[in-house]
Image (spheres, rainbow, N blue to C red):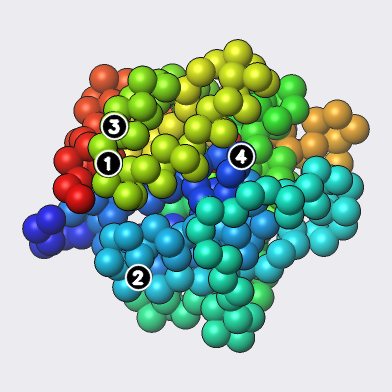
Amino acid sequence: RRKMDMQKKIIIDTDPAMGTKGGDPEDCFAIMMALNSPELEVVGITTVQGNVPVERGYSNAAYLLNEFNSEIPLKAGPSHTFDEERNKERIWLSQREDMEQLTPLLKPEKAKDDAASFIYEKCKQNSGEIELVTIGPLTNIAIALSNYPDLKDHVPKITMMAGAAKTPGNITPSAEFNVWADPEAADVVFTSGIPIVMIPLDVCHQTRMSREELISIGDNPHPFCQFIKEAVDPWINIRTDLISDEGLHLYDSLAMASVISPNLLTYKSAYVRTETAGLLTTGETVCEFNESIMGKILKQKFNAEVALELDVVRFNQLFQERVTGYLRSLKS
Ligand code: RIB
Ligand code: CA
């Protein structure tokens, strides 16, 4: 694709599971959308624990970049959450080590591949120019902010697929997965002072890739399309069993689309914090939209623009153009 004069520079922080059977593959559609978008220059990709352990996410991202003949730098965060105690409570996390891996498993090197220092160095070198797009738990960003407090002065915006504003959660009744997976990290980011655009479940649940669309990708004999079919099918089956919903919500692709074309969505200013100590509500994103209450009682300024409405038709067009249409057109 033709390079545009005014490309937006971004770093994508992600937990990509396309390549690990049974993981949510959707981050990879968002990355494909970014790689196929002339409006964006992807300066780097950093991987975080979340849908899958971090080395699996790193391996899946490496596979994807290779398929795109891309030399974009790829880095990895730690295997643990910001508050290391969090992982210990969650037994299912260790079960993810048993998942079948389709892509070659690579081992990131701590010294060379460190996500937090990469984010800091790149953002400092290009101060005010690189936006962060986070489509996984916020572990890496919180570590970068805590190791390098001046990072906040170099980042003009964070767009995050995170939270639920006025709608129930998707992993517990009150929490969305990315925030629930590392609530302490999310709160570090919400209170960092960096302007935030939050793409919550409220709008993500209006997006959907149907099983038929997925099958249409698999109809292309190109090896990459066959890989996608094999990688995505188990997740669709899990979703069907769990919540009787065939198809995928395009959460992360919507966050990416909002960076490419912000006016696909309508936003409302809010003061957002994360519940970190709830008995039943840990990971909830508590959003105050009422400026008067906020100013008088909480004495806080708005810290986020929260997307609450979506032009679904235009989003679908963009997704078709940059992702499904592209995949269907690949020639063996
Ligand atoms: O809650 C949705 C988020 O978690 C997305 O980032 C998706 O990848 C899922 O696993
Ligand atoms: Ca994700």
Quarter of the picture holding the N terminus: bottom left
Left or right: 138, with 35 as reference point = right
Marks 4 & 3, CB-CB < 8 Å contact:
no
Kind of residue indicated by mark 2: Ile
User: In the rendered image, which residue does mark 2 sit on?
Assistant: 72
Tag 2's secondary structure? loop
User: In the rendered image, which residue does mark 1 sit on?
Assistant: 221
Mark nearer the N terminus (2 vs 4): 4
- Give how far across and how far down residue 217 sits, in percent: 31, 34
Distance between mark 3 and mark 1 Cα atoms: 6 Å
Distance between mark 2 and mark 1 Cα atoms: 27 Å
Tag 1's secondary structure? loop
Kind of residue indicated by mark 4: Gly
**Is disc 4 surrounded by few (<14), some (14 to 19) or many (20+) residues within 10 Å?**
many
Circle 2 or circle 1, nearest the eye: 1
Distance between mark 4 and mark 1 Cα atoms: 22 Å
- Give how far across and how far down residue 219 sits, in percent: 29, 32
User: In the rendered image, which residue does mark 3 sit on?
Assistant: 219
Residue at 29%, 60% (x, y): give it: 68
Mark nearer the N terminus (4 vs 1): 4
